[in-house]
């Protein structure tokens, strides 16, 4: 009768591990759905939070650079292939505006970016420049 | 009617007649299911097109399950799930880390990685691109990227291919790569915690956000108990 009792077991699953394998299979389904949904929604979440479509992706990069270095003139730039480690000036080598507390662990002082705050930052800065 | 002309639907209890047909039919069913699951996994591996890949993958799983219930000798569902999931885990990690390591000065990297970093992990935002190699500036991060891209993930994807083909070496290397995944997580999380001030100060969704985002990559650990308790004889040389 042992043959009939194992007939409904998946291939390779011993009777004593049937429950364990069922749990693992279900967890795998959850992880699969989670991973896919997360993968699909990350870009839209980033875009909405940081101000697209009022800002283009390149402008989001600009605004984040300004936050990163506490410097309103900082812009998002690409660098040529002769950048480090192949030579040339290191990125932000002469940039001295970044605010950190240099203790045992460096702690940055830039603020947390709120929901669509970068749009507001850009608008305020342009208003100041215009006025 | 000769033996070769026997209908192929007789899969069991035929006293050996139709065995070759059964094997061939099983092979074709497995192939038909994989034809849906492979493009599904490739799409899911791109992250942003994942929602389009999921239905394809599920359609393949459905075909496989139907073949299994019909008595054909296809892969067990759990082997398929673990194999493709661990491969997806390797592919997704490789994609993000490879552009951070090799393409950190491109516009795409500069837009996507520091923005993601600002939201979940400022290791990818704080003084981004200022090290010799560029990309993430968090202490130690580059070493994990090199280990992942050159050792762990290629090994993982190769192991998955062998595992999905039900090869003995695939099962053995799957065990190795899943335990290596455990080592990477322990080391990575310890390193990240050592520099928590850098990585989580000023971040939109710190610590808990990181865990919620990254917890889905635990598939390799979840697979370990299965790999050690499955009947190894189902994996052949």
Image: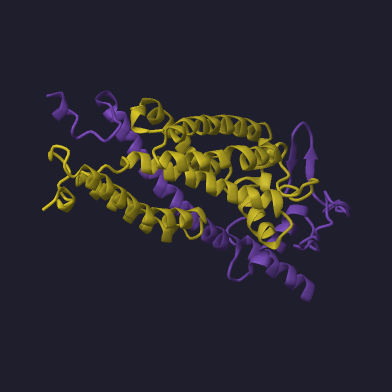
Residue drawn at x 40%, y 42% is B165
Identify which residue, B77 or B145, lies in the foreground: B77
* Quarter of the rendering containing residue A18: top left
Left or right: A110, with A87 as reference point: left
Q: How many marks?
A: 0
Q: Is residue B125 something one can see in this rendering?
A: no
* Quarter of the rendering containing residue B141: top right
Identify which residue, A91 or B4, lies in the foreground: B4
- Horizontal and vertical percent position of residue A80: 81, 61
Left or right: B146, with B18 as reference point: right
Residue drawn at x 48%, y 47% is B88
Residue drawn at x 68%, y 66% is A58
Q: Is residue B100 something one can see in this rendering?
A: yes
* Quarter of the rendering containing residue B163: top left
Identify which residue, A55 or B63, lies in the foreground: B63
- Horizontal and vertical percent position of residue B191: 65, 32
In the image, farthest residue toward the front: B2
- Horizontal and vertical percent position of residue A107: 73, 40
Residue drawn at x 59%, y 47% is B94
Give the answer, above or below, for where A91 lies relative to B173: below
Give the answer, above or below, for where A116 lies relative to B26: below
Q: Which chain is depicted yellow?
A: B
- Horizontal and vertical percent position of residue A21: 32, 32
Quadrant that contains the C terminus of chain B: top left
Q: Which chain is depicted purple?
A: A
Query: What's the colour scheme?
Result: by chain
């Amino acid at each position: 009768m042992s043959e009939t009792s194992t007939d409904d077991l998946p291939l390779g699953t011993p009777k004593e591990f049937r429950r364990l394998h069922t749990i693992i299979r279900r967890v795998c389904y959850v992880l699969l759905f989670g991973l896919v949904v997360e993968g699909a929604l990350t870009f839209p979440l980033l875009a909405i939070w940081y101000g697209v479509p009022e800002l283009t992706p390149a402008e989001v990069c600009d605004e984040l650079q300004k936050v990163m270095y506490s410097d309103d003139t900082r812009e998002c730039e690409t660098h040529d292939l002769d950048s480090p480690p192949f030579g040339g000036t290191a990125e932000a080598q002469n940039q001295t505006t970044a605010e950190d507390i240099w203790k045992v662990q460096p702690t940055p002082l830039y603020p947390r970016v709120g929901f669509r705050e970068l749009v507001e930052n850009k608008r305020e800065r342009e208003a100041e420049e215009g006025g | 009617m000769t033996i070769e002309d026997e209908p192929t639907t007789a899969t069991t209890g035929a006293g050996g007649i139709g065995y070759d047909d059964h094997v061939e039919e099983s092979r074709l069913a497995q192939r038909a299911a994989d034809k849906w699951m492979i493009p599904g996994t490739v799409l899911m591996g791109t992250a942003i097109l994942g929602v389009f890949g999921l239905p394809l993958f599920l359609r393949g799983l459905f075909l496989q399950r139907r073949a299994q219930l019909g008595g054909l000798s296809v892969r067990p569902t759990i082997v398929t799930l673990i194999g493709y999931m661990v491969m997806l885990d390797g592919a997704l990690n490789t994609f993000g880390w490879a552009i951070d390591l090799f393409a950190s000065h491109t516009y795409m990297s500069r837009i996507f990685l520091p923005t993601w970093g600002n939201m979940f992990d400022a290791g990818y935002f704080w003084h981004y691109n200022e090290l010799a190699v560029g990309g993430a500036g968090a202490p130690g991060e580059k070493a994990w990227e090199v280990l992942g891209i050159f050792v762990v993930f290629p090994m993982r994807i190769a192991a998955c291919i062998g595992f999905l083909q039900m090869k003995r070496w695939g099962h053995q290397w799957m065990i190795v790569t899943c335990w290596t995944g455990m080592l990477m997580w322990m080391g990575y999380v310890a390193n990240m915690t050592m520099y928590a001030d850098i990585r989580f100060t000023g971040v939109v969704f710190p610590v808990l956000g990181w865990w919620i985002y990254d917890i889905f990559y635990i598939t390799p650990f979840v697979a370990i108990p299965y790999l050690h308790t499955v009947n190894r004889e189902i994996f052949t040389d």
